[in-house]
Image (cartoon, rainbow, N blue to C red):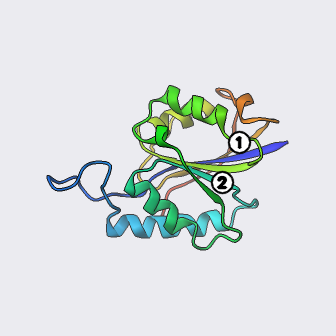
């Protein structure tokens, strides 16, 4: 079975201030636009997104809420606490535990772990700026079978690129 995974770094966030914590940082105006463009990109992909596993931080949740607007049907949103400030090992372990009923899913989290997971799964290094989305594909029956270097990079999208 072919499984598709989107590795998404949250869109651009406002700078942290003394009045709000890192966890509570919202998207900037530019970040909102990036997330909208991300939704347009995801909507034209040749598969239906079944689930989105997201960090519970405000900026990741806002990114998800913006990009799912054009999607029909809407994917299931899965709040995954371990995706906030994760290490690469935490992301790898989370991926192995994802529900196998979801053939096509997205992970929305933070750098540097997202760039690390991309490199781990594709054996390739790329800049992972805010709003970046890598579309990876793999032949696997379960998410636990997804291992380092085993994924095929189908597309690499940065908001603002031509779709």
109 left or right of 27 in image: right
Q: Are marks 1 and 2 in contact (CB under 8 Å)?
A: yes
Give the Cα distance between marks 1 and 2. 9 Å
As helix, strand or loop, the secondary structure at mark 2 comes to strand
In the image, farthest residue toward the left: 18
Q: Is residue 104 visible?
A: yes
Q: Position of residue 35 (x, y in %)?
A: 47, 65
Q: How many marks?
A: 2
Between 60 and 81, which is closer to the camera in this rendering? 81
Q: Position of residue 34 (x, y in %)?
A: 45, 65
Q: Which residue is painted at 17% across and 54% down in the image?
A: 17
Q: Which residue is painted at 43% across and 44% down in the image?
A: 110
Q: Quadrant of residue 77?
A: bottom right
Q: Position of residue 1 (x, y in %)?
A: 85, 42
57 left or right of 14 in image: right
79 left or right of 19 in image: right
Q: Earlier in the sequence, mark 1 or mark 2?
A: 2
Q: Which residue is painted at 74% across and 48% down in the image?
A: 102
Q: Which residue is painted at 35% across and 67% down in the image?
A: 30
In the image, farthest residue toward the right: 1
As helix, strand or loop, the secondary structure at mark 1 comes to loop
Q: Which mark is residue 9?
A: none
Q: Is residue 123 visible?
A: no
Q: Quadrant of the C terminus?
A: bottom right
The residue that mark 1 highlights is 99
Q: Relative to 15, is 71 above or below? A: below
Label 2: few (<14), some (14–19) or many (≥20) C-alpha neighbours in 10 Å: many
The residue that mark 2 highlights is 51
Q: Position of residue 147 (x, y in %)?
A: 68, 27
């Amino acid at each position: 079975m072919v499984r598709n995974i989107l590795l998404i770094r949250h869109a651009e966030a406002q700078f942290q201030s003394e009045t709000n914590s890192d966890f509570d940082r919202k998207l900037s105006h530019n970040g909102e636009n990036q997330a909208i463009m991300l939704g347009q990109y995801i909507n034209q992909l040749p598969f239906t997104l079944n689930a989105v596993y997201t960090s519970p931080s405000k900026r990741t949740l806002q990114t998800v809420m913006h990009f799912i607007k054009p999607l029909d049907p809407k994917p299931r949103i899965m709040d995954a606490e371990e995706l906030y400030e994760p290490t690469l090992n935490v992301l790898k372990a989370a991926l192995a535990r994802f529900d196998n009923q979801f053939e096509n899913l997205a992970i929305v989290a933070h750098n540097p772990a997202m760039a690390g997971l991309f490199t781990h799964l594709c054996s390739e290094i790329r800049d992972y700026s805010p709003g970046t989305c890598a579309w990876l594909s793999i032949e696997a029956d379960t998410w636990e079978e997804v291992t380092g270097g085993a994924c095929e990079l189908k597309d690499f999208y940065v908001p603002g690129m031509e779709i």
